[in-house]
Amino acid sequence: MPVGTLGTVKSLSPEELRDAGAQIILGNTYHLYLRPGCAVIDRFSGLHRFMNWSGPILTDSGGFQVFSLARLAKITEEGAAFQSHIDGSAHLLTPEKAVDIQCTLGADIIMCLDQCIAYPSSAPAVETALDLTTRWARRCKQRWMARGGNRAALFGIVQGGMVQAFRKKSTEALLEIDFPGYAVGGLSVGEPGSLMREMADVSLSMLPEDKPRYVMGVGTPEDLVDLVALGADMFDCVMPTRNARNGQLFTDTGTINITNARYRSDTAPVDATCGCYTCRHYSRAYLRHLYQAKELLAYRLNTIHNVAYYTGLMQRMREAVMADRFDSFRRGFYHHRRPEDT
RNA sequence: GUGGGUGUAGCUCAGUUGGUAGAGCACUUGGUUGUGGCCCAAGUGGCCGUGGGUUCAAGUCCCAUCACUCACC
């Protein structure tokens, strides 16, 4: 899922998103609730019509944003009290309110409010956060059921820091509550990649295969291949879009930093094997020029390529899984990486 | 023509009572994991306009000269 925090995948129109292969996008409760606010989006009967995106939308609950953006956040049993990063105004986000807001946004998949904890944190702090996340998950489920339950799919979120036993405890508790889908949260918060995979594996191996398993906030192309191997079905990550805006482009043979001087007069496309709009029409030299000149088109063309790369990678993995040849795909994928460029 | 001001990194500028030069931007190379287009880190780069002089030592003090600039004639 490309990330469209503010009701737009930055720099792309919905048509360009679709052309780049996006099937579903992510929106943010925290951001959209603060601006433009639910009342505005409700006038359009939801985010789809507001932003002219007819495909599925998943909304994040706001738990992570309270953790990462709002300073002076205060977590209580009731919910997360925080100050807006925009104007400093005070807000209280409860599990029930998180569900209500996401339903107003009209999302197709909504997430439970969770407490994401910093890495590293003490074991008692991690366990306290995961237990609260479990109680909040139960309240989210109740609210969702009270609202009819079937309009949007509600996903629970596993927490538990970097402790295997806590990850297991969190996963078991969510399974008992029973959700249409499950997410693994609290990862990619600064821990080493090997630890991230180890923690994801704990939950992925316990979660049912016939329900979506979503690893939140991950990751690099290698991360995605590794985690799909462990059973993950869905991801969201700002990496393809943010890094596109910072000049880093993804290919099967590693990343390209389009700002590098060696591309100054390079007539080749970013990736000759890529069929995206950018690679079909533009050279590395042009993209470098646009980037150096801070032209708006640089953000757009780079984002188109990276979104196409990520969606293409997921599509290739889906096809490999369905054809029962994922292991050979995975070996080939690693084989093509050039270590000096990754 | 007269009087004043300014000449230091590609650009804009700091540089103490003299002790052989720094910043921001630009450029180069990394980083970026449930998003402000940012931000962070490291690096390249200087006959201190030019020529003399004083001094153990001059970007700094003295003289000359050139360039740019402002005011007045």
Image (cartoon, coloured by chain):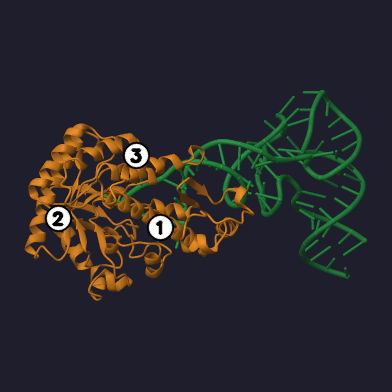
Colour that chain A carries in the picture = orange
First along the sequence among labels 2 and 1: 2
Q: In this orientation, which residue lies closer to the viewer: A124 or A86?
A: A124
Up-down: is A247 above or below B60?
below
Q: Residue at x 13, y 38 (%)?
A: A169
Callout 1, which amino acid?
A: Val
| Left/right of residue A190 with respect to residue B62 in the rendered view | left
Q: Which chain is green?
A: B
Tell which subunit mark 1 falls on.
Answer: A
State which mark lies toward you, 3 or 1: 1
Name the residue tied to disc 2: A180
Which quadrant would the N terminus of chain A be assigned to in this image?
bottom left
Q: Which mark is residue A190?
A: 3
For the residues marked 3 and 1, what is the alpha-carbon distance in whole angstroms? 24 Å
Would residue A201 be visible to someone looking at this image?
yes
Q: Secondary structure at mark 3?
A: loop
Q: Secondary structure at mark 2?
A: loop
Up-down: is A193 above or below A66?
above
For the residues marked 2 and 3, what is the alpha-carbon distance in whole angstroms? 29 Å
State which mark lies toward you, 2 or 3: 2
Residue B52 screen position, x and y as percent:
91, 35
